[in-house]
Amino acid sequence: MLQSAHYRMLRIFLVTLDFWFNTDQSAFPASQVQRSGKLTLSIPLDNLTPSSSAQTSCIAQQTEMSSPDSTESESWEAIYKEECLSFKASLQTQAEILRNDPENLGEDRLKGVRKELISLSHQAERIKEAALEMVDETPNSVYVRKATPEWLSSRFDPQLEQVCISMGYSLDRLAFELRSDRSVDLLVAGHLEQMTDDIEMDFL
């Protein structure tokens, strides 16, 4: 912005000099000619100061830089929601695979389900961490506001934290049971379906 103002001043100065040296001075009134024989340079004040639009743009940029980061408060809520929805969808998918075997894999499908259950046990930990961060960083989140004090409040031992830990253990245990006894596939599917309902009711 300052460079642009300097450029305009230099351009006016050069144009004026060119105009002076290539124009008959007698055509100008005597009051406009100094002792040096040169025209009095009259530079408008607008060319020496930033334009109002430029000043507005500068102020807006400074305000944006000095304002607190509003996206951080939204991000933890978004992360929590995304983790919960992904967790719920994966539970539904694994329950469907165990109950209906849509790809006709038979017992071979159990290996993939066990691997996914172990992955979901780690995701339960991520849900817990996202929830606790959300409480600290986003106290006005819709999930925090509608929760009971015992469910998410940092002043107590949050029930959500205990439930997430319990879900992680349960998923590891179900994966172990599938490996030990392949006949429990429908029983495990029932547990996953119940866990899906719990996520929908308590977490979302």
Image (tube, rainbow, N blue to C red):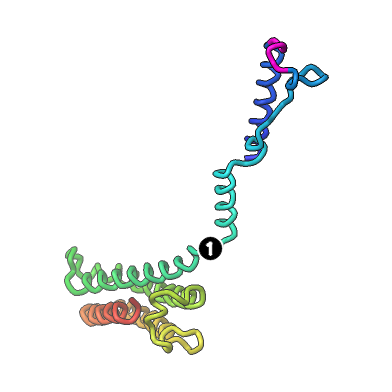
Between residue 116 and residue 131, name the one nearer to us. Answer: 131
Q: Residue 160, position in %: x, y?
A: 41, 83
- Residue numbers of the magenta segment: 24-29
Q: Which residue was labeled with disc 1?
A: 69
Badge 1: few (under 14), some or many (20 or more) residues near its Cα, within 10 Å? few
Q: Amino acid at mark 1?
A: Asp
* Residue 82 horizontal/vertical position (percent): 37, 67
Q: Position of residue 169 (x, y in %)?
A: 39, 82
Q: Quadrant of residue 7?
A: top right
In this view of the protein, which residue sits in the foreground, 173 or 161?
A: 161
Instruction: Describe residue 14's horizontal placement relative to residue 103 as left or right.
Output: right
Q: Residue at x 72, y 12 (%)?
A: 25
Left/right placement of residue 79 relative to residue 52 reads left
Does residue 129 show up?
no
Left or right: 147, with 195 as reference point: right
The quadrant the N terminus occupies is top right
Q: Residue at x 17, y 65 (%)?
A: 104
Q: Is residue 26 above or below residue 151?
A: above
Please name whichever residue, 202 or 137, is drawn nearer the observer in this view of the structure.
Answer: 137
Is the residue 15 above or below the residue 173 in the image? above
Mark 1, secondary structure of its residue = loop
Considering only vertical position in the picture, is 10 above or below 199? above
Quadrant of image for the C terminus: bottom left
Residue found at x 51% / y 77%: 136
